[in-house]
Image: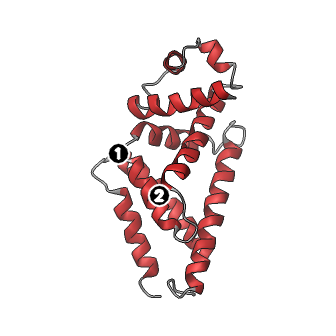
Amino acid sequence: MAKREEILTAALEVIARNGYRRTSVRELADAVGLSQAGLLHYFSSKEELFQEILRKRDEVDVESYGFDLARPIDGLVAVIRHNADVPGLVQLYAQLSVEAVDPEHPSHDFFVERYEDLRREFGGYIREEQRAGAIDPELDPDLTATLFVAASDGLQTQWLLDPSIDMSEHIMQLWRLVTRRA
């Protein structure tokens, strides 16, 4: 387990620095002193390796930026702001999430569960904000949570094409629109 964690931590750094497309399994193996075969010994496939890199990224983001249950919008914005510093990881996420729409893809379940968790947690936050009078009670919390997740992912794709886009400012604008008429 310790070597697997070392691999994932090193992979986060290498991919963030070099980009997803410019990082080979050989380079990841070299970063932790293993052969390619030795690296893949810890994972069932290259696809599982990349999925686990994303899972590790999520863990690190939660540890680093937190998701204060009292105000998860701040954590979301902090992570999005951080993503602008790690374009390689954003590329990996975007690429793998598209590939995972195929139910046969090894990362399919990971993304289905990730999106379900994000929508459920953010939907719960919106319900709390509605009870507190900060969000219009007429808004459907689940639909609104889905819109935030979709906006976050869509902004990442747009930012990959045009780095002048400020992803976090766009999410904050959406938040201001949602909270404006409470």
Q: Residue 129: x percent and y percent?
A: 55, 80
Q: Amino acid at mark 1?
A: Leu
Q: Residue 45: x percent and y percent?
A: 67, 25
Tag in front: 2 or 1: 2
Q: Residue furthest left?
A: 164
Residue at the spot x=39%, y=68% of the render?
172
At label 2, counting other C-alpha atoms closer than 10 Å, the crowd grade (few under 14, some 14-19, many 20 or more) is some
Marks 2 and 1: CB-CB under 8 Å?
no
Say if 139 sits above or below 46 in the image.
below
Say if 33 sits above or below 72 in the image.
above
Q: Is residue 163 left or right of residue 32?
A: left
Q: Quadrant for residue 126, please give it.
A: bottom right
Instruction: State which tag comes first along the sequence, 2 or 1.
Output: 2
Q: Quadrant for residue 67, please give it.
A: bottom right
Residue at the disc numbered 2: 152
Q: Is residue 173 left or right of residue 110?
A: left
Residue at the spot x=60%, y=76% of the render?
141
Residue at the disc numbered 1: 161
